Each structure stands twice: as structure tokens, then as C-alpha cells.
Image (cartoon, helix red, strand yellow):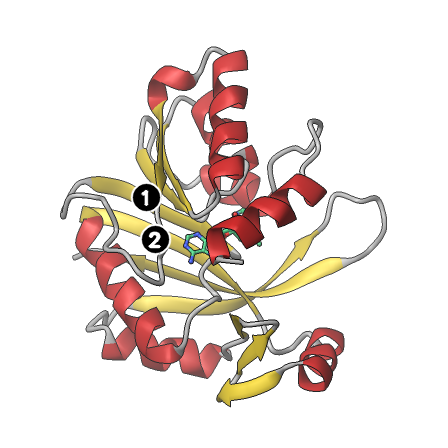
Amino acid sequence: MDDSKRWDVIHQKTHHELKGPSIYARERENLFPRGSLIVDLGGGTGEDAIYFLQKDHSVVLLDISDFALKIAQDKAKANNLSERLAIRKVDFGLHQLPIKDDSVDIAYSRISLHYFESEHTIKIFQDIYKMLKTGGKAFLTFKSPEDVKEMEYLKNVAVEFEQNVYIENGQLRSRFSKEQLENFLKQAGINEFRVEAYQEKLANGDDSALLLNEIVFEKR
Ligand SMILES: C[S@@+](CC[C@H](N)C(=O)[O-])C[C@H]1O[C@@H](n2cnc3c(N)ncnc32)[C@H](O)[C@@H]1O
């Protein structure tokens, strides 16, 4: 099964109508300039994108899954928000990002860029930097290797392909450390950035949280 179909199946299983925006989206949206053009990389079924549209931003949602893109588009239509949403099918592992250089206010990605080895991750950082306008900002989160349970699971079921990159059922999963991400940003030619641990509470009523690393940088 190719990655696009694999993700269709995952979204078909996990999508539900009442899912709302992530806490991360709600916390960071406050920092976006009003009326921003946002590119949501790996935006899935569009819960965060719909939230940004409701806050009067415009969104280009990029994702590999036809199923997820269709759900996002249908939701935007149902909320009369489709005029400010564009969807594009993209495989970040294979394709150039379909976004003009120097055109975007905010590059946003929540836990969608950890499917690639280090070299390709560096290239994605370069492409994100290029698409930003001067003064535009990137907000990107990655799953962290600090999640001991998940790392134990990966070490048991997957093969380590390079440091903190595993192959599980034919799919790459990276769990880069803060230091690795800092190194990659430098190698991408991005000199000013912030990489911090970020715990995202899940909206499931208990105390569980996703252990993430957040990257923030601005184009100078
Ligand atoms: C863990 S989900 C996160 C979705 C969404 N950002 C969220 O916060 O709920 C990862 C997303 O990345 C997309 N994705 C996975 N591999 C991709 C690739 N190679 N190119 C583009 N999108 C990809 C998946 O379809 C999925 O929507």
C-alpha cells in the first residue's frame, strides 16, 4: 500500500465529526498577525485549519491523504469558510512544496514532519524558510524521544535506520532530540530559531499529554 492510501485508512479510522482544534493551535494562533496567510503542512482533516479560518486567516492545507483533504474541504464548506481555504495533495517525501517563495505569513505544522530521515528533514526546513515572507514565522512541532513509553515501543517493534529514525511497517518515524533539531536548522542555514520542549495536553479529559519539541523561527 502506498503512503497516501495508508494515511487514508488511518484517517478513516480516527476521524470523527466532533473533533475540535488542538490546544497547540489555540495557544499559537494568538501570536499570528491578523489576516495571515497560513500554510498548514500535514494538516490532515483540518481541525486546526478550520479554527484558523474562523479567526479570519486564510489557509493552504497540504497533505498526502485524499480522504483527509476532502473532509477538510467539506467542513470548510459546511461552515461557509471555503473561500479562504485551498487544499493541495503533496507528499513531502517526494514533492517540492507547491508554494511560492516569500509569500506566506505563517508556516504551521503539528506532528506531521516526522516521517523523514535527517537529510530530508533539513531540506524541508529550507523549503519552509523559503516560502516565508520576510518577518513571516514558522511554528512546527515534532514528537519527542523524551516519551519513554513510545520509544520503548519503537525500539521493540521497529528497526533503527539512523539515530532516532525508525522503520515501522515500511514507514519512517523520526523522534529527533532537541539537539538534533537545532543542528538540522543550522545545517539548513537558519541561524535564529528556538527549539523547546512542549507538552500538549490532550482534550480527552484525563491528564495525558503529548511530549513534543517545538521549533519557532522567523525569516529575516
Ligand atoms: C499525526 S497526523 C497530524 C495531523 C494534523 N496536523 C493534526 O494535528 O491532527 C500526520 C499528518 O501528516 C500527513 N502526512 C503523513 N506523511 C505525509 C507526507 N509524506 N506528505 C504529506 N503529508 C503527510 C498525514 O496524512 C496526516 O494528516
Amino acid type shown at disc 2: Ala
Residue labelled with disc 1: 106
Taking the image as shown, residue 111 lies to the left or right of residue 135, namely: right
Residue labelled with disc 2: 138
- For mark 1, give the secondary structure: strand
Amino acid type shown at disc 1: Ile
| Of 87 and 53, the residue lying toward us | 87
Taking the image as shown, residue 85 lies to the left or right of residue 211, namely: left
| Of 158 and 212, the residue lying toward us | 158
Q: Residue furthest front?
A: 1
| Of 211 and 2, the residue lying toward us | 2
95, above or below 60, in the image? below
- For mark 2, give the secondary structure: strand
Which quarter of the picture shows residue 127?
bottom left
Quadrant, the N terminus: bottom right
The answer to whether the residues at label 1 and label 2 have Cβ atoms under 8 Å apart is yes
Q: Position of residue 205 (x, y in %)?
A: 84, 44
79, above or below 122, in the image? above
Q: Position of residue 75 (x, y in %)?
A: 54, 22
